[in-house]
Amino acid sequence: MKRLLILFAFFAAWGAKSQNYSPVKGKLMTEWGEKVTPENVWREYPRPQLKRTDWQNLNGLWEYAILPKDDKQPKNFGGNILVPFAVESSLSGVGRSVLPDEKLWYQKKFTVPAGWNGKNVVLHFESVDWETTVWVNGKLVGTHKGGSTAFSFDITKYLKKGEQELVVSVWDPTDTDSQARGKQVLDPKGIWYTAVTGIWKTVWIEPVGKTAIKSVQPVADIDLRKVALHTAFFGLKGNEKLEVKVSKDGKTILTKEFGANNEIVLDIPSPELWSPESPALYQLDLSLYGSGKLLDKVGSYFAMRKIAKVKDEQGFERIQLNNETIFQYGTLDQGWWPDGLLTPPSAEAMLYDMEVLREMGFNMLRKHIKVEPSLYYYYADSLGLLLWQDMVSGFETAKRSVQHVSWDAPNDWARPKESADQFEFEMKETIDQLKFFPSIITWVIFNEGWGQYESKRVVEWSMNYDPTRIIDGVSGWTDRKVGHLNDAHQYPGPGMEPAELNPGRAIVLGEFGGLGLPVENHLWNPNMRNWGYRTYSSTPELIKEYTKLMHNLYPLRYKGLAAAVYTQTTDVEGEVNGLMTYDRKVIKIDPELLRILHAPLYSTETTLVKNVVKDSHVTGQTIHYTKTDPGKDWFSKAAIGSFSSVSGPLNVGKGESVWSAQSFDLTNLPNGISLKILAFGKVKVYLNGKLVLDKRIIGKRHYEDFNVSEFSEYLKKGKNLIAVEALDFENAAPFDFGVYVY
């Protein structure tokens, strides 16, 4: 009977606690969000790169209040919020915006385990957006500015016997200031999403000895078969020893002891190299000893892998993994969720996205202007998913015309020093906290001119600070010829910048695609404009257009393209251009089909490409044209000699049409043929009198590439004729075209 009473009391208390929480109703939910409770929310150990056995999770129900920005700490808190979900999210249980003239307050009561006596107690916040102030038992502990990176405080001297009181205040200017905020805005629409305020990753405490391991950073050298461990410590006295144990798949490979201050370099015999096909991870156990006593013990891991940029036999810059050229193809991954916003509803949900992408045949993703929980990067390491990690961008929406640098702007934004210093502080924190993870192979510094300033200095600093990775200095729009990559964005594309104009840099397509499909009952807001860069009404249409994109992407590898990023993994709020719906309940294209379509991209075959009709992308070439309708069947008997001629590209006015033709000679019949076209209207292309392309093309800056190899049978030895008509230009724009065979 006593046991039954105890169980009844437990379940009654659990039920009462749970009744204080429920998600905000009427919002789109994932299957994982539907299972979230205060008792199960984000229970995983949050720091896989440096694991200790003792720790305490502080996630769960906290009390909160929202007050005017300048008000003092409240005496009473107004309700419950589920940490670590931002206050605006459904899963927080609040679902309320916090404006820049307001401040968000939290309160949490907790106790410190008795077994932690004699050790320092460290309070960890994995991320809080944006300016955070922390008190413990009424005493100010510290502050932190930055919305995406982790920070911690030693709270030992603020603790008392019994129950502890933790109070946190958060102020977030969102898009009224220029701090790093990614895609958050107070008025979300289009590519801009709901603002996020407050704690949005795990909060936890751990006991740390007076002398302890602070960090470990493995740096692998696969050519020498070695790994260096860069370690840092708390409170060294000078005579400590560090025991290092390396194991793989449960088998010990080596155990060595070093002076804690000594350089640590380990020989790894016959190393298993990390790659998407074989993501081999080595386990690392570090034990710190002093005066014969164990002072600290942590678990970690590392991978043997190498990223480099090299010139191939055709002179193209290629990216290599482990000394072998690899083409990278992945998605633009926003990492947003309908129920948790920036916070995934669970670790399982977070892992699901990555597993689906691997099933779809992607070997990479670009983590777009968001820093995920550390566990995310461990999953990428374990799955063999290559990551491009964006820095989180920021600029004030009200002054976007100044701070959002136009694609043709001659100069960067003259960023105020205070704003620049804060960006660089957060950029350095991001690199320092994430450089541990081997899956991250590229840092993306600026995106599409958002807050872009002093590109040369900032990008070169990044290259010097982390020489072990590829630096994508400027992704899209405002190329400043810095960094390791020339990264263009083109929708729908695909297309690429000419390798000839970019000596020393690899050519990548940092964003393209964006094919949209709204799926009924899986929309963030059915009443808003749900859009893609091209939007379709059925799955067969979407599959057809995606297949065309892949077909056009294949030959670009031969012309020097090193990587491509498709927009995007999932729908996000008003964007419906994801391969999955926002709630992850519908996969729009079968993963097996996608895997088949993607497989040719990873071929290591190289083919010499010949430009048989010069375009003007590199240098102006002669375009033979007329703006007067040349009549029926002109494309099979084009009188090029009667056309006007101009050094391209040709300027065409709004509403005008243009007809152009060019002949070329072939001594041998090629395997494939592709076109490169710049136009802004309805385009038809004829090869030796046969129609090979009928497409609406919209582009003032970027050439689009079209693979028409299925029509190679129309080619012949000797003289060939290519004819292009571009009708009813929708805007004044340049016109140009080129032909390539391979």
Image: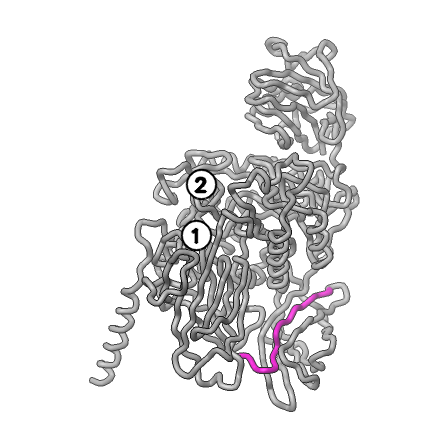
Towards the viewer: 646 or 208:
208
Could you say where residue 465 lies in the image, as x and y percent from the top left?
71, 59
Could you say which disc has been placed on residue 189 in the image?
Answer: 2
Q: Which residues are magenta?
A: 208-221
Please rate how many residues cluster around mark 2, counting C-alpha atoms within 10 Å: few if below 14, some from 14 to 19, many from 20.
Answer: some
Q: Residue at x 27, y 69 (%)?
A: 15
Residue type marked 1: Asp
Could you say where residue 375 lies in the image, as x and y percent from the top left?
52, 64
- The kind of secondary structure the magenta stretch mainly shows is strand
**Can I make out residue 563 in this image?**
no
Could you say where residue 63 lies in the image, as x and y percent from the top left?
36, 65
Residue type marked 2: Lys
* 81 horizontally vs 342: left or right: left
- Residue 262 among magenta residues: no
Towards the viewer: 457 or 201:
457
The residue tagged 1 is 101
Q: Residue at x 61, y 53 (%)?
A: 418
* Mark 1 or mark 2, whichever is nearer to me: 1
Task: Please tell me whether residue 64 is drawn above or below residue 1 in the rendered image.
Answer: above
In which image quadrant can residue 634 be found? top right
The tally of labels here is: 2
Quarter of the picture containing the C terminus is top right
Spatial separation of the CA atoms under disc 1 and disc 2: 22 Å
Task: Please tell me whether residue 229 is drawn above or below residue 464 in the rendered image.
Answer: below
Per the image, label 2 sits on a secondary structure element best described as loop
Could you say where residue 72 lies in the image, as x and y percent from the top left?
41, 63
